[in-house]
Image: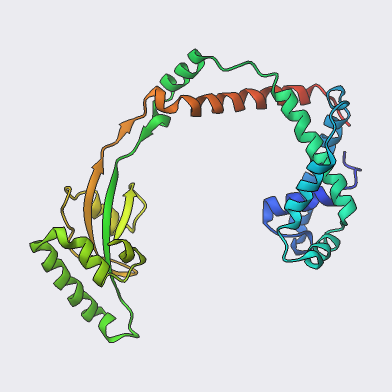
């Protein structure tokens, strides 16, 4: 495997997966890693396609054409596509050949994966019972938000003025908390103003720390005091609380089935590859 010349397509695919860049943009260390992984990927592809299970696997021309069209669609025009191929040591013919091999490889691996034993209902129930921590939903709170930004370029948004503005709004909301959506729509400088400050359902850790801490202590319908973040000053209203709860088996059955099926397919594929020997 060490003497195998790395295929430009394998190298390009790995460079984009690992580093989100083309081959020409890699530094020497990155290129060396890409070459190692490309050789391994190429060797695996060769072993799989040489196996008896691959002999009758054919890929239709229209499937290769569709794969090519998907790649071409990432570029502004045909010239940009051709230029990038050349930059990465490819042309359209070589790309089609590589795509065809990749599609054959995927088809063979799906064929092998289909040998995995079916997932029984008792397997699903056992997995659900053994992993309760995976099937819990944290507390969620539906909230509204009002923001006055701090911006020294505008007189009304300098720190003192911004604080005075939001304190006036806080006083109004203390007297009439049900007006939060109305005042957010009129006064908030956050894009959520268009929806009356609506943030939707929030879990812990989604908001700025000061806002997060405040929201998860509010009663339903209550409005926070003035809060500060690097954006400016905020007010929050808690609209609704969904308590933390465990998800029932019926809610997770298909998710667990898919997970276990994928695990079994990967295992049987690994076992099959291990028995192929070296190319």
Q: Residue furthest front?
A: 62
Colour pattern of the rendering: rainbow
The residue lying toward the viewer, choosing from 7 and 82, is: 82
Q: Residue at x 81, y 47 (%)?
A: 65
Q: Is residue 12 left or right of residue 204?
A: right
The spot of residue 161 in percent (x, y) is 22, 81
Residue 57 in the image, given as x and y percentages of width and height: 84, 29
Is residue 265 in view from this perspective? yes
Residue at image position (33%, 39%) is 138
Tell me where residue 19 appears, x and y as whole percent. 68, 55
Q: Is residue 273 left or right of residue 210?
A: right
| Count of residue discs | 0
Indicate the quadrant containing the N terminus: top left, top right, bottom left or bottom right: top right
Say if residue 33 shows up in the picture. no
Q: Is residue 32 above or below residue 158?
A: above
Q: Nearer the viewer, residue 253 or 231?
A: 253
**Height in image: 206 above or below 83?**
above
Q: Residue at x 81, y 67 (%)?
A: 79
Q: Position of residue 95 (x, y in %)?
A: 85, 51
Q: Residue at x 87, y 22 (%)?
A: 52
* The one of 244 and 273 positioned closer to us in this rendering: 244
Q: As drawn, is 91 to the left or to the right of 226?
A: right
Q: In which quadrant of the rendered view does residue 85 lie?
A: bottom right
Q: Is residue 172 above or below residue 13?
A: below
Quadrant into which the C terminus falls: top right
């Amino acid at each position: 495997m060490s003497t195998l010349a790395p295929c430009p397509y394998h190298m390009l695919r790995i460079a984009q997966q690992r580093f989100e860049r083309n081959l020409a943009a890699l530094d020497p260390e990155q290129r060396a890693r890409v070459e190692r992984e490309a050789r391994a990927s190429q060797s695996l592809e060769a072993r799989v396609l040489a196996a008896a299970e691959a002999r009758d696997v054919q890929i239709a021309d229209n499937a290769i054409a569709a794969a090519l069209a998907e790649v071409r669609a990432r570029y502004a025009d045909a010239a940009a596509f051709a230029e990038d191929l050349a930059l990465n040591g490819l042309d359209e013919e070589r790309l089609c050949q590589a795509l065809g091999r990749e599609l054959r490889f995927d088809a063979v691996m799906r064929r092998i994966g289909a040998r995995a034993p079916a997932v029984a209902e008792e397997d699903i129930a056992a997995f659900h019972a053994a992993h309760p921590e995976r099937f819990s939903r944290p507390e969620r709170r539906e909230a509204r938000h009002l923001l006055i930004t701090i911006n020294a370029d505008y007189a009304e948004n300098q720190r003192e003025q911004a604080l005075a503005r939001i304190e006036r709004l806080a006083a109004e909301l203390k007297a009439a908390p049900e007006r939060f959506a109305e005042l957010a729509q009129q006064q908030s400088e956050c894009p959520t103003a268009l929806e009356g400050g609506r943030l939707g359902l929030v879990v812990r850790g989604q908001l700025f720390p000061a806002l997060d801490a405040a929201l998860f202590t509010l009663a339903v319908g209550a409005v926070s005091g003035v809060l500060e973040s690097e954006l400016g000053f905020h007010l929050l209203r808690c609209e609704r609380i969904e308590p933390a709860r465990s998800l029932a088996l019926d809610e997770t059955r298909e998710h667990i089935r898919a997970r276990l099926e994928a695990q079994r397919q990967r295992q049987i594929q690994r076992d099959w590859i291990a028995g192929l020997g070296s190319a």
